[in-house]
Amino acid sequence: MKFFEKTFLTALLLLIPMVLSAQNQDKSLDALHVTHEQSLHQMTATWTNQNGTDLQLLDFEGQPVIVVMFYGQCTGSCPVLMQRTWNLYKELSENNQSNVQVLAVSFDYKNDTPEALKSYATYEQLDLPNWHFVTAKHSSIRELAMLLGVQYRERSDGHFEHTNLITVLDNHGRITERIEGLSGNLNSSAQKIEQLIIENIQ
Amino acid sequence: MKNLIAHIVFILILASSALGFSAQEPDTVKVYVLGTHDDSRFQPATVEVNTGSVIKFMVKQGMHTVTAYHPDNRRELGIPADAESFDSGMLVVGDAWYLTVKIDGEYNYFCLPHERMGHKGKIIARQEQHNASSTKSVTQQKRINQ
């Protein structure tokens, strides 16, 4: 047999068991490793909001959640991103606004304490019962960003560079809508949220 | 026949000139948007215009918004009660954003990212003559320079 054919057969004999082995590996997910098809409610992280109340994403089971990542000292895109989040919320009927939760997660685990977040929410007139400005351990913030697909990095001056994203989780914590950037019509996203609310009621 | 054509052309020229003189274009006032951080400012910060004027905001530095003080923008009302709220969205260098003020009064506005650094402006709109106020409010248009 020619050398090439021998080599090919050898490789095939080595690869087949490897492939079969990979297929038979346990597919269960580690609790910290969820994909976009999985519910973010599986996250065990504890978030503390502007009122000092601890919560977990699982607490929002049964309601859609609008998630946005920002930081309080931002003088760049965050205020515009927060305005878009507010505009999305405003697109909902007044009745539906009370059936959705808004989770605003700060990148700045050092400075955005619950007290600082309270001050921020008050200034922005967003200290509403269903708006949660939260902080958590650095690792939890990083994990959530990864799951949402938000890229960010802390600069040496304490500010953050970050992508701008508003995410909608469905009633069971799965990502159902991703609104990227700082412009664009929010009407279809609002309609999606209202549909989720209807599904929850039915 | 030639004389007839000449007369018709002459009358048409006169008519178009008359229309041109009677249809006044609104004034356009330029406001430059400058700065990148705590030096952010509208220049001039206060403009006095005739009602119906167009204010052209031209971003020369940084990233800014032109946002009305209005409950729609989560702020106390700072524009005439009958005027529509406005919010340009994020504007970057090279962008131009147009605002037409059609109701008399004072329009207070700010830049969302730099409000706490004092990045605010004011438009004072007054009727040039004592005509009935328009019931229409503000129209807005954004044009991005490419």
Image (tube, coloured by chain):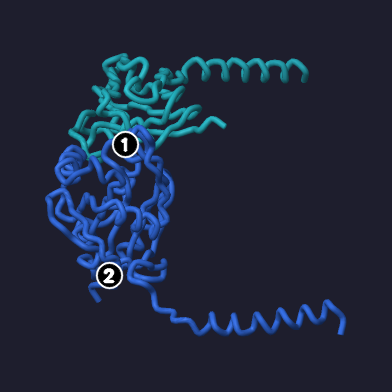
Chain under disc 1: A
In this rendering, would A125 be left or right of B127?
A: left
Residue A172 image point, x, y percent:
30, 70
Give the tally of numbered discs.
Answer: 2
The residue carrying mark 1 is A74
Residue B92 image point, x, y percent:
45, 31
Q: For the residue marked with disc 1, what is the amino acid?
A: Cys
Against B100, residue B84 (above or below) is below
Residue A195 image point, x, y percent:
32, 67
* Chain shown in cyan: B
Q: For the residue marked with disc 2, what is the amino acid?
A: Ile
Residue B133 appears anywhere in the view: no
Task: Check the image and name the residue furthest to the right.
Answer: A2
Q: Quadrant of the N terminus of chain A?
A: bottom right
The residue carrying mark 2 is A198
* Chain shown in blue: A
In this rendering, would A51 be left or right of A142?
A: left
Against B131, residue A193 (above or below) is below
Q: Quadrant of the C terminus of chain A?
A: bottom left
Q: Nearer the viewer, residue A154 or B118?
A: A154
Q: Nearer the viewer, residue B129 or B96?
A: B96
Residue A180 appears anywhere in the view: yes
